[in-house]
Image (cartoon, rainbow, N blue to C red):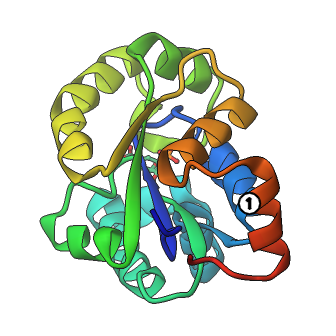
Amino acid sequence: MPLPRRIVLVGPMGAGKSTIGRHLARELGYHFLDSDRMIEERCGADIPWIFDVEGEEGFRQRESAMLRELSDVGASVLATGGGAVMKDENHPFLKQDAVVVYLKASLDQQIERTRKDRNRPLLQNDDPEGVLRRLFELRDPIYTHLADVVMLTDRKSPRLVVRQILNRLNPRTPRQRRKVRKEGKHND
Ligand code: S3P
């Protein structure tokens, strides 16, 4: 299978999209893009501030605009926010020229990895675990439907997840991959 021009990571909060995305991009020599961080840079404010001032819908509009913009860049790995799949209008932007990888994590892992987080407004309440459960029930079928590859991340190091994704995408040896990277080619 030729390497795709874009790899788009979807999945719940705490699945490891940003960390794994950064490693994967480095491995492939692709740009790493993180839609949440880019929304923050563009807006000059962090996500809690955007939710506070503009509400979730204001954030979702910024997110759709960013996903549209990022659908058209070159070889890249894109980490999306957990709710990026919720608007149908975003789906073509996620799928365009891309292999969509669903980074799947159990509820326990999501809870564990987001426990101390203060940067996710949807979890700043009395029942973050209940929120994660409800969001997972709602979103898991959508992630699964959109995904070309589903990859479990529970108790795996980012390195291992990256290796498993690369094996699924392009089952070449690491040596062959290094050669392709050195020559700056992303397609067979
Ligand atoms: C959200 C997930 C967050 C961020 C925002 C909303 C969600 O991104 O986009 O707080 O709706 O699940 P991460 O999945 O990177 O935490």
Q: Nearest the camera: 49 or 167? A: 167
Judged from this view, the residue extending furthest toward the right is: 182
x and y percentages locating residue 130 in the rendered image: 30, 16
Can you say whether 29 is above or below 177 in the image?
below
> Within the image, what quadrant is residue 161 found in?
top right
Q: Residue at x 35, y 25 (%)?
A: 132
- Position of the C terminus by quadrant: bottom right
Mark 1 burial class by Cα count in 10 Å: few <14, some 14-19, many 20+: some
**Image coordinates for residue 102, horizontal then vertical, percent:** 39, 43
Quadrant where the N terminus sits is bottom left
Up/down of 170 relative to 162, above or below: below
Residue 126 visible in the shown view: no
Q: Is residue 143 left or right of residue 164?
A: left
Kindly identify the residue that appears in the image at 48 percent across and 70 percent down.
Answer: 4
- Residue 166 is situated, as x and y percent measured from the top left of the image, at 59, 48
Where residue 13 sits: x, y (%)? 47, 37
Residue 187 showing in the rendered view: yes
Could you tell me how many numbered marks the image carries? 1
Q: Quadrant of residue 150?
A: top left
- Relative placement, left or right, of 35 versus 162 is left
19 or 59: nearer the viewer: 19
Give the camera-side residue of 102 and 168: 168
Which image quadrant for residue 142? top left
Mark 1 and ligand 1: say if the CB distance to the nearest ligand atom is below 8 Å: no
Q: Which residue is mark 1?
A: 177
Label 1: which secondary element: helix
At x 47%, y 31%, the residue is 124
Is 154 positioned to the left or the right of 127 in the image?
A: right
* Amino acid type for the residue under numbered disc 1: Arg
